[in-house]
Image: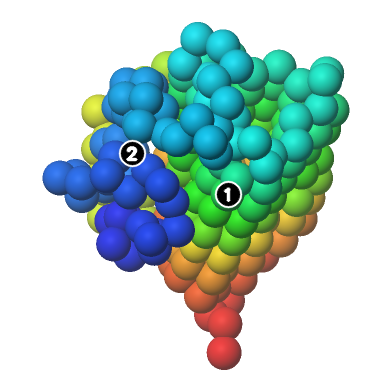
Amino acid sequence: MYQIKDLYDLKETQASKLFEGVTYPWEVLDRIGDFIKEYGKTLSPDEYDQVGEDVWIAKSATVFESAYIKGPAIIGNHTEVRQCAFIRGNAFVGDNCVVGNSTELKNVVIFNNVQVPHYNYVGDSILGFKSHMGAGSITSNVKSDKSLVVIKGMGEEVATGRKKVGAMLGDYVEVGCNSVLNPGTVIGRNSNIYPLSMVRGLVPENSIYKRAGEIAKKH
């Protein structure tokens, strides 16, 4: 349930080649920036404007004047970047997405049709197709003791070898308002997280996370 093939439909991102040759989604985190720089050069100038160093924005996207975008970054077709959004670099944002007011992105891949619409922080994370983070929900990407992140769940542990790992959200995941996804959280496809949750480790696909130790299976 940790693997790319278990979490994501790669047809729903222009960054599909980024995931080639790796098993786990966090393995691509160090490659996002370089991938954007190379992929951006292939984008059609009829469809995308290059507005700064390593920043490409689709002509059909809407970016409010108060938003800040630092490269490397790609903003996809029909995506909306709202007031005071802060995109810090290494951000590949897909088509038909919403990056909301005061939302901060750093080192992320956002698949198509994803919404992070209100006061979200998303760092060192990958958000699958049609996933949604409720208002105020965030990814925490560094442990308090600064040790390397280990993914835990289903009776096993997977070492990432990384100090910074946020959350891996599968396709169609819904995260409730004001939830915190702790470093190394993996949420399987079609799962829901209750509001005000503190989540750590693996949440299986087709589940409802109510609180630590209480995860119901969807029927």
Residue 14 appears at what percent x and percent y? 41, 47
Tell me what residue is drawn at x 53 percent, y 36 percent: 46
SS class, disc 2: helix
Tell me what residue is drawn at x 35 percent, y 32 percent: 42
SS class, disc 1: loop
Residue 39 appears at what percent x and percent y? 35, 31
Decide which of tag 2 and tag 1 comes sooner along the chain.
2
Instruction: Indicate the amino acid at tag 1.
Output: Asp
Instruction: Indicate the amino acid at tag 2.
Output: Trp
User: 106 or 167: nearer the eye?
Assistant: 106
Q: Which residue is mark 1?
A: 95
Residue 53 appears at what percent x and percent y? 50, 10
In the rendered structure, the answer to whether residue 73 lies left or right of residue 15 reads: right
Residue 53 in view, yes or no: yes
In the rendered structure, the answer to whether residue 102 lies left or right of residue 189 reads: right
In the rendered structure, the answer to whether residue 192 lies left or right of residue 84 reads: left
Q: Which residue is mark 2?
A: 26
In the rendered structure, the answer to whether residue 4 lies left or right of residue 93 reads: left
